[in-house]
Image (cartoon, rainbow, N blue to C red):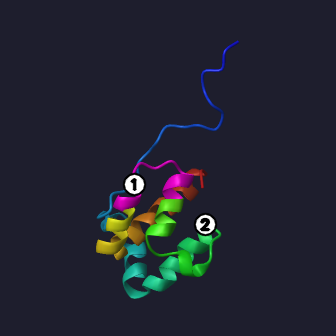
């Protein structure tokens, strides 16, 4: 019997919300607005990383790779550099949704 699928491979997906869907989770948006660094630490804790790694392009790239989310390092750099609050909130929303779905 021939093997046609590699084990552990799954189709690429997208983030579950767009970069600017702040109104989808107002609580996370407010959390980011009033305590941006705390939100970053929360993301790092969720991903079992150092608190200093919770904000920016690096954590976003690690997360995209882990969950096979479409994108590129260039897009991660632009999102985290041009709109860090939106990019960080999007990441936290996606983590929370994956937790609810039992796939985090």
Q: Residue furthest bottom?
A: 34
On the question of residue 22 being in view, the answer is yes
Packing grade of label 2 (10 A; few <14, some 14-19, many >=20) is some
Residue range highlighted in magenta: 63-75
On the question of residue 83 being in view, the answer is no
Residue 13 image offset from top left, x and y in percent: 44, 44
Task: Assign the N terminus to one quadrant of the image.
Answer: top right
Identify which residue, 25 or 1, lies in the foreground.
1
> How far is disc 1 from disc 2 in space, using C-alphas?
20 Å
**Height in image: 78 above or below 33?**
above
Packing grade of label 1 (10 A; few <14, some 14-19, many >=20) is few
Q: Which residue is mark 1?
A: 72
Residue 66 included in the magenta stretch of the image = yes
Q: Residue furthest front?
A: 74
Residue 95 image offset from top left, x and y in percent: 52, 61
Q: Is residue 61 left or right of residue 44?
A: left
Q: Is residue 96 left or right of residue 6?
A: left
Q: Which residue is mark 2?
A: 47
Residue 59 included in the magenta stretch of the image = no
Q: Residue 97 got which mark?
A: none
Q: Residue sitting at 37 percent across and 68 percent down? A: 87
Q: Secondary structure at mark 1?
A: loop
Q: Are marks 1 and 2 in contact (CB under 8 Å)?
A: no
**Height in image: 50 above or below 9?**
below
Q: Secondary structure at mark 2?
A: loop
């Amino acid at each position: 019997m021939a093997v046609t699928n590699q084990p552990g491979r799954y189709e690429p997906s997208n983030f579950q919300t767009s970069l600017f869907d702040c109104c989808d989770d107002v609580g996370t948006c407010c959390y980011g607005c009033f305590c941006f660094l705390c939100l970053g630490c929360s993301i790092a804790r969720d991903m079992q990383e150092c608190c200093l790694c919770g904000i920016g392009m690096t954590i976003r790239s690690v997360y995209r790779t882990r969950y096979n989310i479409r994108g590129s390092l260039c897009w991660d750099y632009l999102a985290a550099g041009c709109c860090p609050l939106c990019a960080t909130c999007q990441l936290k929303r996606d983590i929370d949704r994956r937790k609810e779905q039992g796939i985090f």
